[in-house]
Image (cartoon, helix red, strand yellow):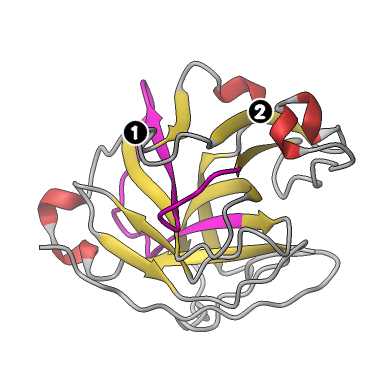
Amino acid sequence: MSKKLYLYISFVLVLCLALPASAEETILASYEKSEVGDLTAKVNNEEANPSMVVAWPMLQGTDANSYDPDFGPGLTVPAATDGEYVLGFNWTKESDGRVDIEHEWSSSTFDLVKNEKILIDVYIVGPNGVPNSIDLWDEDLAWFHGRCSIVTDKWFTVAFDLDEVQDSGTRKKDHSKITTIYFEGVKTKDGKVFFDNLRLWRPSDTKPDSPKKDDITTIRN
């Protein structure tokens, strides 16, 4: 049975620096060219999202319209939060208020041992495409509700808390898929969004002053 986990995340909008020095991160997807062939990032449910297009790798500073015309002219791919490339997706005829992105790796795997959170950076081209929530579900992990302060036209970070998953020994190791990261309750039929820097987060084993769970800070500006 899936479990609803409520998480707390605070944001610090500054010019540089991300998480506290006492934290460690493991990159799962940075959407760079080097990840093509291993990572598949695509629409999770094409029948429910027939107008949705996923494009990556998208080079920062380039014309988004060159990757897919539905991004529209004049939209520049935002600066990546990690590396030089990002993932972008758009939709034009959404009817059920939900859009889904699936991630799967053909050769890489990841473990949840000692990790406390999955983080992802999100950029919503406003005002369209704003959801009520950003959630994560996987058949081998659990259901996670990302409760955060959603903004538009800036990067912000969504966190999915793994604490309860750590209690399940069968759910810790050798994962190669995240079934869906999805926007729930989208109020408009069209939208444009970018993802970057999907990663695992944990406090450093060597630092005595690890941050509290509700003190995770990140820059995305």
Q: Which amino acid does label 2 sit on?
A: Pro
In the image, residue 96 lies in the stretch drawn in magenta: yes
* Residue 218 seen in render: yes
Q: In which quarter of the image is the N terminus?
A: bottom left
Q: Which of marks 1 and 2 is nearer the N terminus?
A: 2
Residue hosting label 1? 109
The residue furthest top is 37
Between 49 and 166, which is closer to the camera in this rendering?
Answer: 49
Q: Which amino acid does label 1 sit on?
A: Thr
Q: Position of residue 7 (x, y in %)?
A: 41, 78
The residue positioned 45% from the left and 52% from the top of the image is: 95
The residue positioned 40% from the left and 55% from the top of the image is: 96
What range of the chain is rendered magenta? 92-121
In the image, residue 90 lies in the stretch drawn in magenta: no
Q: Position of residue 68 (x, y in %)?
A: 70, 27
Residue 62 found in image quarter: top right
User: For this view, does 210 lie left or right of residue 45?
Assistant: right
| Residue 111 sits above or below residue 176 on the image | below
Q: How many numbered marks, from 0 up?
A: 2
Q: Which of marks 1 and 2 is in front?
A: 2
Residue hosting label 2? 57
Q: Where is residue 105 in the image (x, y as percent from the top left)?
A: 39, 28
Q: Indicate the secondary structure of the residue bearing disc 1.
A: loop
